[in-house]
Amino acid sequence: MSRTRYEVVIVGAGIAGASLAYFLARRGVGDVLLLEREANLAYHSTGRSAASLSTLDTHPTLFALKLLAAPFFASPPADFSAHPLLEPSGVLQLFGAEAWASIERQADALRGAGLRFDLLSPAAARARVAALDGGFAGAAWIPGDGRIDVHEILQSYLRHARAAGAELALETEVASFSTTAGRLSAVALRNRDEVEAGLVVDAAGAWAGVIARLADASPIPIVPHRRTLFTFAGPADLDFRHWPLVASEPHSIYFTPEAGELMLSPMDEEPIEPCDPSPDDSVIAAAIERFGALAPTLVPRVIRRRWSGLRSFSPDRAHVVGEDPRRPGFFWLAGQGGCGIETSPAVGRIAADLIVDGRTAIFDASRIAPARFLAEAVG
């Protein structure tokens, strides 16, 4: 940090904070300080994701945000990155009977919203991924989705933000906040000088609730949930390198090729305090059993790597974006669940618009505003 006052101080330099800094730079706001508690970037959720773009979502707000964001990954601004952001290897979503009937009913509306996809029979799904056995009623094939380069995305957001004047401070933890005339006005940092702030943005991921309580902001519960991933060798006689990501609703798992191996997630969501989480062996064992029912020839004998990350949810599981109605000067950018990376081109821009203009023309911001929870509490 070279100065002691900034127009915008962003707490958290993961994908949420970095995308906001980038879009603020695009709006001409470069007087930004990003605070990161860890010594390395992407230490928590951003660096532990499945690195995938999966646009189809049963949550209407998340689906709308994903659709709004997806074109950025397929065709980013010409100067944004040195390498492509998206490998459109496709996503194959499998559904049980009830969910399949719902998807069939919604197909026209989903296409009308802009999603390009095909509905497949179980046999057609197995034609794409031969290892699939049974236990699902149908599938949605989304060819434009696939794997995203999280490192390239994060570094590109930050590179452009810093070129516009933003500063990044690693190993810098918030201790407390100060107010002036009822407005948040300064951030006290552990082992560093206090910095004055025109606006403080809470982009602290799993620690967003901790930061909000320090600032005496509205009591919106942001609850972290553990999500586990592990890798293993695929069959030596099977070329799975170009398979899509396969997500099975009835089996509560997804798997995808990963650096010459296969990666699988139990799709677990255990509420947990903010921490550096470790995988639970019983969760992995249960996932392998479910995996065996879906793709018995792929069941691993040995797990190569295992890790867990935190996905943080608001009460209605949609993002919380906007200035706190009870604490002026405090701006929420939190509760991004499991799609913070996927939605970052949309949410970062929406947040920047709200900060600069007080409104945005690209999305109904009331759907993600913090005030929606306070209105429910009053009602």
Image: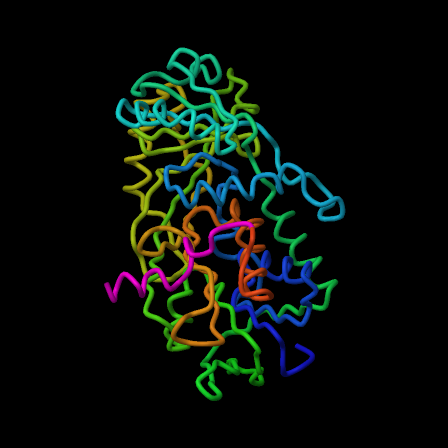
Q: Is residue 265 left or right of residue 49?
A: left
Q: Nearer the viewer, residue 174 or 293?
A: 174
Which percent across, then down, holds residue 352?
58, 61
Is most of the magenta stretch helix, strand or loop? helix
Q: Nearer the viewer, residue 29 or 334?
A: 29
Tell me if residue 354 comes above or below residue 309 in the rendering: below
Which percent across, then down, holds residue 7?
62, 75
Quarter holding the C terminus? bottom left
Quadrant in the picture for residue 168: bottom right
Q: Start and end of the magenta stretch?
A: 362-379
Tell me if residue 360 comes above or below residue 285 in the rendering: below
Quadrant in the picture for residue 358: bottom right
Q: Is residue 50 left or right of residue 226?
A: right
Q: Nearer the viewer, residue 266 or 302?
A: 266
Quarter holding the N terminus? bottom right
User: What residue is shown at x 67% (from left), y 67% (from top)?
Assistant: 29
User: What residue is shown at x 35% (from left), y 20% (from top)?
Assistant: 296
Which percent across, then down, holds residue 24?
64, 62
User: What residue is shown at x 37% (from left), y 15% (from top)?
Assistant: 122
Which percent across, then down, holds residue 44?
48, 56
Furthest toward the bottom, the residue is: 181
